[in-house]
Amino acid sequence: MFNFLINPIFLTYIIIFFIIIAIIIGFFVLRRLKKDNLGLMLGMSLFLIKIPRYEKKDKNESIELKHLLGISAQMYASFNILPKRAKIIFEVASSYNEEEIAFYGACPKNFVNEFKKVIHGAYQNAKIEQVENDYSIFSSKGKSAGAYIILEKRNFMPIRTYHDFENDPLNQVISAIGKLNIGNGAALQIVLRPVKKNWYKGAKSTLFNLKTGKKQDIIKIWEKTINDVVGVGSKQNKEKKEEPIDQEQIEAISKKISRPVFNVNIRIIANALTEIEAGQILDQMLQQFSQYSLPNQNGLQIKKVIGYKLKKLIYNFIFRIFEKKTTISLNADEIASIFHFPYPGLEVPNVKSVSSRDVAPPNILPNKGELEIGKVVYREENQKVFLKNSDDRMRHFYIIGQTGTGKSRFQQELIKQDILAGRGVGVVDPHGDLIEATLANIPKERYSDVILFEPFNTENPMGLNMLEYETEDQKDFAIQEMIAIFYKLVTDPAMIGPMFEHYMRNAMLALMADSNNIGTMVEIPRLLTDNGFAETYISKLTDPVALNFWRNEWKKTSEQQKGDMFGYLISKVGRFVENPMMRNIIGQSHSSFNLSNIMNQGKIFLANLSKGKVGDMNSNLLGLILVSKIQMAAMARANMKEKDRRDFYLYIDEFQNFTTDSIAIILSEARKYRLKSNLNRIFPVLTLLTFLIVI
């Protein structure tokens, strides 16, 4: 009978067979582990973390390093609640295409809320911004250098912490990164997750045996326990030599395990145009890690890698993989001593930080109401903000900002809400874009409410007569406003003067003498040159002062003096009278729309005064007239009962072009007539009068 067990050939085949099976099993196990790591990586969210920069009030102001790093240690301790196999990553890096240093954090997607709460619990004013596209420290033509960190001795032995530091070692890393030029990149990465419960059981068991004098083989047993939990190979254990453990070491171990402990990977990567330069950057960053050694206890050991091991290190860095073979055990204080966020007194200027602090919205801020005016974003939580009721809008809106900051867009959204709510709205726009956007937002049921004033529509010109009035008070207001408008339109107010006011006032009084046949600005030149035409208006005058001007003062004025005054007036009025488009608008004795009716009936009045189509000066004149007439219409509500005054919302884009000093009336008096203004201005400087009213 053939004995298979002693046949050397058969035994060889058996051994080869089992080796092949082992290789295949190992391959699939490694593949599964790799997929698990990638799966964990893909389930991570990356955040840019900014801390407010603190400026010392006094050069001699002291910075309490222990207190500040203690905050960071408490933050790490709070991450002890991480679920099984979950990991947290923190990085400080400078991308190859940026000069700023950034601090990043990553966590599982199902742990994002807890992650933010922990950081905000330690750093209340921190800003945590999600990063959609990961940063890179690697340029396409760059060369890399890298290293990872392990412990010099056993995992349960402590290293030096911030309690024993006078200066912060992390500053050396940040300073080295901060000196990088565009094209170079570098990063310090720590990956951590809480140790298993067996770690603490083994530590307490070891301490008990040490205290009771059972020292033989205890160190080996402990190392085996730690390595079984952490996954460090036996080769590393053989390189370590046993050292006697005294009372000081027992106290040190007790202190270490009194704080939450984590399994940690520490990686340092540098990238530059040449290997030599990358190595120099790496060496500068690694100088930090020589400061953590404690005599007779523990320290950090640097392991530089090249070739395949460097590629693997870079792979693990990019995918933020937790690797058991390079794992060390550190407690919260030790981690905070190695990696923490910037603190007051950090002298590196190019760290990304919070330029303005976010403040939590007050509890009294309305979250529902008549008008949504925006939202408060605090710690990535959005809370809508409303004006609670119409009375809040009686205080008016003043929107200020530079070009392109969204002033008109903001007004557009407010107008849309008012129109959809069925409110009366007036919009005066010097560009036309706001009007076009508003027209697109008008629902079909409100089409009949729209009055669109477009001066450039010369086929169907709409009349606008500033000299129209209904009461004597309105008549006086119209005259005062027209004079103020001309002061506004000229570049030098000295070009107007008292003589202009005197002649212009009396000319307008004459044209407004007959309420059934009111003249227009276009007729002012003819009034001064055609005696017969002038008499048709002068004969209707009842004001003794104006009548005396025309019957006595004007008749006694010499022809030369009349000619001089005529030229003086025409130089101010002629530019509008001689323009056909403007003449067809301001030359009509009756306006094509009644602003009082528009306001009282809750209509939608849109004035498209596009400067590109009308001209800058013409746009300003028409806007000034419109705003003045809206103001007159609002004040005419004094004759109405307050309960009958319907709210009307006036929006003026770049209102500084369309208002005189009487804007103060709109801001103070007109609100009692239910005219609610929304003013938009590009320049940050207010006139003194407006400023006093606003404040």
Image (tube, rainbow, N blue to C red):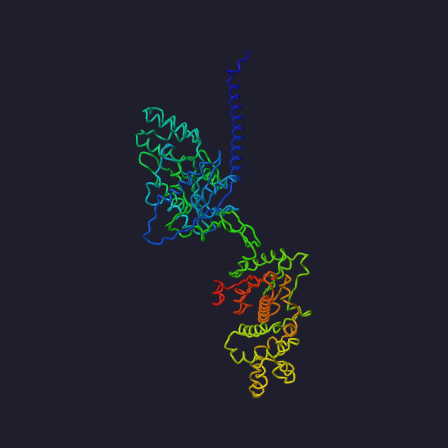
Query: Is 5 on the left or on the right of 282, as rendered?
Result: right
Residue found 51% across the figure and 78% down from its top: 497
The residue depicted at 34 percent of the width and 48 percent of the height is 63
Residue drawn 45% across the image and 33% down it: 324
| Residue 20, placed above or below residue 338 | above
Query: x, y percentage for residue 257?
Result: 38, 33
For the N terminus, give its image quadrant. top right
Position of 244 compared to 401: left or right? Answer: left
Report x, y in % for residue 297: 33, 34
Q: Residue furthest front?
A: 641
The answer to whether residue 195 is left or right of residue 488 is left
Write down the quadrant of residue 158 in the picture.
top left
In terms of image quadrants, where is residue 533? Answer: bottom right
Nearer to us in this view, 253 or 259: 259
Residue 361 to residue 476: above or below: above
Residue 121 left/right relative to 572: left
* Spot occupied by residue 264 in the image (x, y as percentages of width and height): 43, 37
Farthest-out residue, top? 1
Question: Horizontal and vertical percent for residue 127?
Answer: 47, 48
Q: Exactly how many numbered labels are in the figure? A: 0
Q: Nearer the viewer, residue 269 or 22?
A: 269
Front residue (pair 686, 638): 638
Position of residue 446 relative to residue 570, above or below, is above
